Image: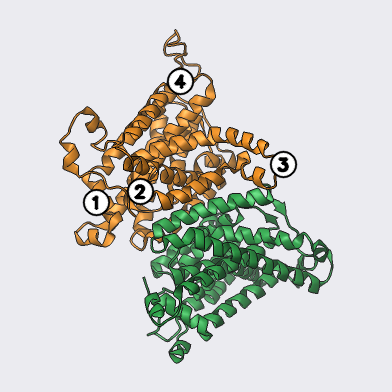
Amino acid sequence: MSDMAAESNTPAELPRAKTDWLPLVLIPALALLALPFVGSPSTWVTLTVAGLAMGMMIFLMASGLTLVFGLMDIINFGHGVFISLGAYATLLVLGPLAGWAQADSLGLNLALLLLCILAAMLVTGLVGAVFERVIVRPVYGSHLKQILVTMGGLIVTEQLIHAIWGASPIPIPLPQSLRGAFVFGDIVMERYRVVAVVIGIAVFLGMELLLNRTRIGLLIRAGVENPEMVEALGYRIRRLFVSVFIAGSALAGLGGVMWAFYRQTLTAGMGMEVMVLVFIVIIIGGLGSITGCFVGSLLVALVANYVGFIEPKLALISNILVMALVLIWRPQGLFPVARR
Amino acid sequence: MTSSPALPFDETRRQGGFLSAVLSSDLPRSRVLSVVLLAILLVLATTPFVFSGSQPIGTAAKICVFIVLVASYDLLLGYSGIVSFAHTMFFGIGGYGIAIALERLGPTWGSAAIGLVAALALSAVLAVAIGLLSLRVRAIFFSMITLAVASAAAVLASQLSSLTGGEDGLSFQLPQALRPAFRLLSEPLFGTAVNGRLLAYYLVFFVSLLVFLTLLRIVNSPFGRVLQAIRENEFRAEALGYRVVAYRTAASVISALAATIAGALMALWLRYNGPDTTLSFSIMVDILLMVVIGGMGTMYGAVIGAALFVLAQSYLQVLMEAGSSALAGLPLLPNLIHPDRWLLWLGALFVISVYAFPGGIVGRLRRAVP
């Protein structure tokens, strides 16, 4: 069984062991296509790196949602509030350790960022566990009720954030050494974006490894394919469900931290604002597919960046256009997940 | 999704009578509900004469508009089982249609009509496009795609400032007969001046009533039954030969048209339209709360939900203010019942509604003593 799993890279399509390369080629092709329109190569590199970083942040925020959907068939409209919650959780670390943010040492600053991420993942993981138990569990199987009830959870949790941390926006400064940009000739790369790209790639590779090379991953993929069968083989699918939901929430928290430092302001609605992008991304990627989510994030962010540079007026609806085009090409998204 | 099924068609039809005809044979079927509905109707019909000042009449007009808006949303959510997040987009189109036409073409009835017709046409085209693109795949695609489209519409409205006035919105003049300075009768009637403002209120009231009754008629028509059948079991309805995509698209078009009318009424009443009054996502959340708390799949739920919600919006905060100051010394508690946190409690009520009484308040009342 594990041999079979090792051969297939896309989670849901056991019979077809070959990787679907076409969507993966899309990103470099798009980047190359944009080059002549942008004109100067240095601007192009700047735009591409900025777009990749943006895409990574979107991926971090979206990956949890698509993971939860893939395994549990739960569509969590309250996912956005976990992004906000993760962002606010940084305050727990930034409060006591304010000195670390001021220190002009890269090590200390990165450690602070790491601590923020840990705190955020812990908080959102815990709240995720409660959310799963109280909000989601009674409505397994009914999409309509899931949408409604998770919207309700979103409203309540967002209001609780207001009640605990106050309703006014809170500024959070980037740690000292992550500000500014690297400059190579004409090419400008913001430092923080480079950090975001590194973290995004690390999380993506980590998830792919976990899903494709470990026993847990095997079970999760089996659960996506056929939950009853996994249960019949003696695994507690419920426990798997809960841990995946917690992991998904924690990933949202991680994304929330990165997004918060990027925006440098905290508002309770910040998660919901970005949810539109998140939904577009997971629709483009194919609901439930991590690889699709990754490709979709990069695609959307890069297109937004290029279009924003070439034809600013069009940038407002570029996301929708990308989504429409992808859905016309592949109605189930780039990497359709077989079941359902 | 289950909700209390309506009585079979013929059984009630035979009872006949004027009331039954007006209400499309879909009577409230609960004594308490009938009394509450009647009370709401009476209060809304007499507000300008009974209450003085501009706040009550403003609240009443808002309730009228929201009843239409929520009822049209219920056609989608409650009767067809589709969750759309683009309903505010159609609401906004109606508002902007009136606002742009009256501002550009001058304050006449003709330009209001042009604006309304243009808005209705645009809404219909958009609803068909969204429906055909996304309803054929899966219902949750529709939710997510409408969310994306609605946010794009909101961005578009705030960016095309030469046409829509951007974030500031548009203020405009109403036709002569609806202006406060206009007097229909020289003498006050029951102590209230019969001016343009009063006429505007009754325009809102009667159009709302008419659209509501039309919607009630639609959901109780054979067409409405098919929608409910699709909601209950899509596969079976398809197997019976109903074209699910066509029916769902038609439902979303009808719902979009009614929302457009509601938006037009809102703009007429406020003499203003902007992103915050008709397009914002928070209004979408409000509509969801109203439908679910009032009762999904029962048109009367829209009336109860809208009335309750708008009243809570205006008056619950006063209550919470008092509670909050009473608990001033304690930690966190005063924050939880701070007047700005009223949505917290309605949100909790919303979640409980979805679990405990899926039929909302109306479903609850109908299940109690008839």
The alpha-carbon separation of the residues under discs 1 and 3 comes to 57 Å
Q: Evaluate if marks 1 and 2 touch, with contact meaning CB atoms under 8 Å apart.
A: no
User: What residue is pinned by disc 2?
Assistant: B78
SS for dot 1: helix
Horizontally, residue A59 falls left or right of residue B28, namely right
Q: Evaluate if marks 3 and 2 touch, with contact meaning CB atoms under 8 Å apart.
A: no
For the residues beneath circles 1 and 4, the answer to whether they share a chain is: yes
For badge 1, the amino acid type reads Val
Query: Where is residue B50 shown, x and y percent of the image?
Result: 46, 18
Query: Where is residue A55 shown, x and y percent of the image?
Result: 59, 68
Residue A21 seen in the current view: no
Chain of the residue on which disc 1 is drawn: B
Residue A264 seen in the current view: yes
For the residues beneath circles 3 and 4, the answer to whether they share a chain is: yes
Of circles 1 and 3, which is in front?
Answer: 3
SS for dot 3: loop
- At a point 58% along the width and 76% down the height, the residue shown is A204
Colour used to depict chain A in the structure image: green
For the residues beneath circles 1 and 2, the answer to whether they share a chain is: yes
SS for dot 4: helix
For badge 3, the amino acid type reads Gly
Establish if B119 lies above or below B354.
above
Q: How many marks?
A: 4
Quadrant the C terminus of chain A occupies: bottom left
Q: Earlier in the sequence, mark 1 or mark 3?
A: 1
Of circles 3 and 2, which is in front?
Answer: 3
Give the label on residue B329, or none. Answer: 3
Quadrant in the rendering for residue A261? bottom right
User: What residue is pinned by disc 4?
Assistant: B48
Q: Earlier in the sequence, mark 4 or mark 2?
A: 4
SS for dot 2: helix
The alpha-carbon separation of the residues under discs 1 and 4 comes to 41 Å
